Image (cartoon, helix red, strand yellow):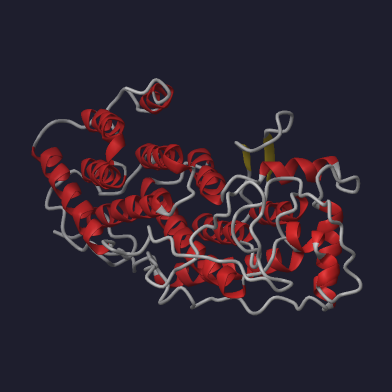
Amino acid sequence: MNRLVLPFIVLLLATIPSESVPAYTEGGTFVDNEVVIAMNELTYTIANQHDHFYSFIGVRALAMVHLAMHDIFCANDPQFERYYWNGNLGGAHPISAAVESTRSLLVSAYPDRRDTINLVCHRWQQKISAGAAKRKGQKIGAEVAAAYLLLRNHDGHEKEGDYTPMTKPGDYQYTPGNNNWVLKPDFSVAHPFTLDSVTQFRSPPPPGLQSLAYTQSYRESKAYGSKGSKVRTEDQTRYAHWWAEFGEHSWNRVGRITAKERHLPLMETNRMFALFNMNLYDLYLASLESKYFYDTWRPYTAIREGDSDGNPETIADPFWEPEMKTPPWPEYPSAHAAVGASGAEILDEVYGTSKVSFRMESVTALPDARIRMYSDLYDAVRECADSRIMNGFHFRFATEEGKRQGILISRHTLSHFLRPLPLSTTPSE
C-alpha cells in the first residue's frame, strides 16, 4: 500500500466510533450524524487526493453519494422528497444500505482506491449487528448505487473540449503556470442535477471595456490584487490566501464543522450535503458556460495590455503580476464568489438562520494565519468574493455577478429538490 495514503487511512479509521453505529430511534427518527460526516470526509478525501478537484469527478461523486443516502434515509423516514430512487427498504438497515451505496459509488469512480474505500466502509459495517437487516441493507445499498450509476451514465462530466484563444482586446489569454491549458471549455453534452440546461442561468454581458464599471474595477484590481500590494491591508492579504482553496474544500468543511457542533440530525446533515454538492456541480456548469460564452481576459492580461483596450483611463503596467497564480479559465463571472453565495444560501435554509458561527483552517492559508472565525454566513460570503480581487484573479463586477448567479441557482435548487414533505406522510412498508 502507498505509504503516503496510510496517514489518511489511520485518520479516517480513528473517526469510527468503537461502539455500535447509532441508527435510528424506535419511531424511525435518525439521531447521530457521525456516519454521514464520515462518508462525506471519505468521499472528499479520496477525490482531493485524486486530482485536487480539477475535474468534475469529485464534485459528481460527492453529489451522488449524498443523494443516494438521502433516498435511502427517506425510504425509512420520509421527511423530504427523494431525488431519484423510490424503492422500499423492507426491513433493511438504513445505515448499512447508506454505507454500501457509498462504497459502491466510490469504487466505481475511483477503482484504483478500492482497498482504502473498502477498508473504511467495512469498518463502519462492522459496527452494525450481524443479521438479516444488515445483509438486506447491503443489498439495497448496492441496488441504489447501481441505479444512480445508470442515471448518470454518459452524463458528459469527463468531456474536456477544445479551446483556442481569440486575439482582440478583452479576450481571454492563457496565463502563466498553466501550460496553455484551460478547464472544461465545452459543456454541450453536460447533464446537470437540477438545471433544465447549463444556459438556464447564463450571466448577462459584462461591462464594456470603455465603461465606468470596467474602469473602476480595473483600477481596484490593479492596486489591491498586485503581488506585494502596498495598499492592501495585512488582513486582506491573509483572507486572499485563506479563501484561495476551491469551494469543494471550504464549504463541505463548513458543513462538517457546523453539523457536528450544532448536532444537526443525521437526515438533515445528509440533505445539506446533497443539496450543496449537486448545486455545486450545476453551479460550475453554469458558471463555466457563462465564462466561455463571454471569454473575457483576466486582470493579469488586462492590466499588462491596458493600453490596447481603447480606454484612456486604464493605464497599462506591462510588468504587473497578481498576488497568486491565476486559475486557467476566463474571468467573468466569478465561480468562486458564486460557490460562496450558494453555499451560504443552502446552509441558511438548513439551519433557519445565517447566524452560524464557525472556526476553520484553510489548506491555502499563510502559515501565520491558518484559522479564521465567522459568526454570520454572509460575512464569509463577502470575504470569499472579495478575496478574488485581493489575490488578483478577478474584477469587482465579476465577483458581484458571481454572487448573484450563485444565489439564483441555489434558490432554484432549494425550491425544486429535496423539499420537506407534509407531516402526514407515513413511512414506506
Q: Is residue 177 above or below residue 315?
A: above
Q: Quadrant of the C terminus?
A: bottom left
Residue placed most toward the observer, 71 or 408: 408
| Total numbered circles | 0
Q: Position of residue 166 (x, y in %)?
A: 63, 71
Q: Quadrant of the N terminus?
A: top left
Q: Position of residue 97 (x, y in %)?
A: 21, 45
Q: Position of residue 33 (x, y in %)?
A: 39, 41
Residue 107 visible in this rendered orientation of the protein? yes
Residue 22 visible in this rendered orientation of the protein? no
Q: Is residue 236 left or right of residue 15?
A: right
Rendered residue at 72%/71% (across/down): 170
Q: Is residue 373 left or right of residue 6?
A: right
Q: Residue furthest left?
A: 132
Q: Is residue 66 above or below residue 151?
A: above
Which of the 4 image quarters holds residue 124?
A: top left
Q: Is residue 251 above or below residue 288?
A: above
Rendered residue at 68%/46% (across/down): 325
Q: Is residue 75 left or right of residue 360?
A: left
Which of the 4 image quarters holds residue 424?
A: bottom left
Which of the 4 image quarters holds residue 78?
A: bottom left
Residue placed most toward the observer, 353 or 171: 171
Residue placed most toward the observer, 219 or 46: 219
Rendered residue at 22%/42% (across/down): 100
Q: Position of residue 214 (x, y in %)?
A: 80, 72
